[in-house]
Amino acid sequence: MQISGAVARFIEGEEANIRMDRLARKYLGSERFEWSMPGEQRVAVIVRPIKVRHIIGVERFRPGGPVPAP
């Protein structure tokens, strides 16, 4: 899937941290995002989609991620 769009707004501070924790619960099964570094600041970017493409026939990624281009 490919999504192109325009930035609608930036979210910073505690709300950005809450959103990161929500993603960690959904995708990692962890109550909180545990890999933050000291002094790091989270920013969530809300994108207003302009174009959405569903690409069919693309080879799936191999376990461990995509193979880097030569």
Image (cartoon, rainbow, N blue to C red):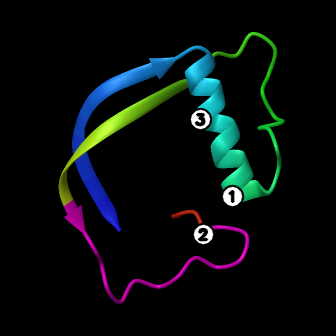
Tell me the residue at 51%/64% (across/down). Answer: 69
* Front-most of residues 58 and 48: 48
**Quarter of the image containing the N terminus?**
bottom left
Q: Nearer the viewer, mark 3 or mark 2?
A: 3
Quick check: 67 left or right of 30? left
Above-or-below relation of 14 to 46: above
Distance from label 3 to label 2 (Cα)? Answer: 30 Å
Quarter assignment of residue 62: bottom right
- Disc 3, SS: helix
Q: Please tell me how crowded label 1 is: few (under 14), some (14-19), or many (20+) other residues with Cα within 10 Å.
A: few
Q: Amino acid at mark 2?
A: Val
Main SS of the magenta part reads loop
| Residue annotated with mark 3 | 19
* Label located before the other in sequence (3 or 2): 3
Above-or-below relation of 36 to 29: above
Residue 55 drawn in magenta: yes
Tell me the residue at 59%/35% (across/down). Answer: 19
Residue 42 visible to an observer of this rendering: no
Which labelled disc corresponds to residue 27?
Answer: 1
Distance from label 1 to label 2 (Cα)? Answer: 23 Å
* Label located before the other in sequence (1 or 3): 3
Distance from label 1 to label 3 (Cα)? Answer: 12 Å
Q: x and y percent of residue 12 in the render?
A: 51, 17
Q: Amino acid at mark 3?
A: Arg
Chain part drawn in magenta: 52-65
* Front-most of residues 31 and 41: 31
